[in-house]
């Protein structure tokens, strides 16, 4: 799928799908937390575990968002 069309679907879902919007907001929050950890000069063992956990959570959210995009595409294929 062309990137433009994909971006349009994501923008549409942000406006019309509460679940997609919540997933995106949570993804951004995890991203901010990961960036804050990565900005540190050195991480404690606990911070490294937290960074790893947040990255997994981000990936899971991204998978959920991609599933919603796929469902939208299937419903509006034509």
Image (tube, grey):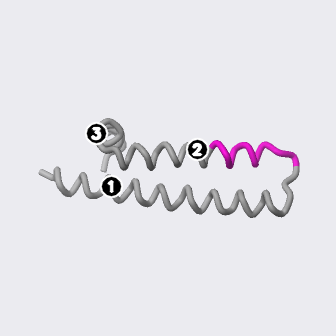
Residue range of the region highlighted in magenta in the rendering: 32-41
Q: Residues within 10 Å of mark 3 (few under 14, many from 20)?
A: few
Q: Position of residue 29 (x, y in %)?
A: 58, 44
Q: CA distance from mark 3 to mark 1?
A: 12 Å
Q: CA distance from mark 2 to mark 1?
A: 19 Å
Nearer-N-terminus badge (2/1)? 2
Q: CA distance from mark 3 to mark 2?
A: 21 Å
Residue named by callout 2: 29
Nearer-N-terminus badge (3/1)? 3
Q: Residues within 10 Å of mark 1 (few under 14, many from 20)?
A: some
Work out which residue is located at the far left of the displayed protein and give it.
78
Q: Is residue 26 visible?
A: yes
- Viewer-proximal residue among 68 and 21: 21
Nearer-N-terminus badge (3/2)? 3
Q: Residue at x 44, y 60 (%)?
A: 63
Secondary structure beneath label 2: helix
Q: Residue at x 41, y 59 (%)?
A: 64
**Label pair 3/1, CB-CB below 8 angstroms:** no
Residue named by callout 3: 16
Secondary structure beneath label 3: helix
Residue named by callout 1: 68
Q: Is residue 9 visible?
A: no
Q: Is 78 displayed left or right of 47 in the figure?
A: left
Relative vertical location of residue 62 with respect to residue 36 in this rendering, above or below:
below
Q: Residue at x 24, y 52 (%)?
A: 72
Q: Position of residue 31 (x, y in %)?
A: 61, 46
């Amino acid at each position: 799928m062309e990137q433009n069309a994909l971006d349009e679907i994501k923008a549409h879902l942000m406006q019309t799908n509460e679940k997609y919007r919540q997933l995106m907001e949570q993804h951004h929050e995890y991203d901010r937390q990961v960036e804050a950890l990565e900005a540190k000069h050195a991480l404690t063992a606990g911070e490294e575990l937290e960074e790893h956990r947040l990255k997994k959570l981000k990936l899971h959210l991204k998978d959920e968002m991609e599933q919603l995009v796929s469902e939208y595409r299937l419903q509006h294929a034509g």
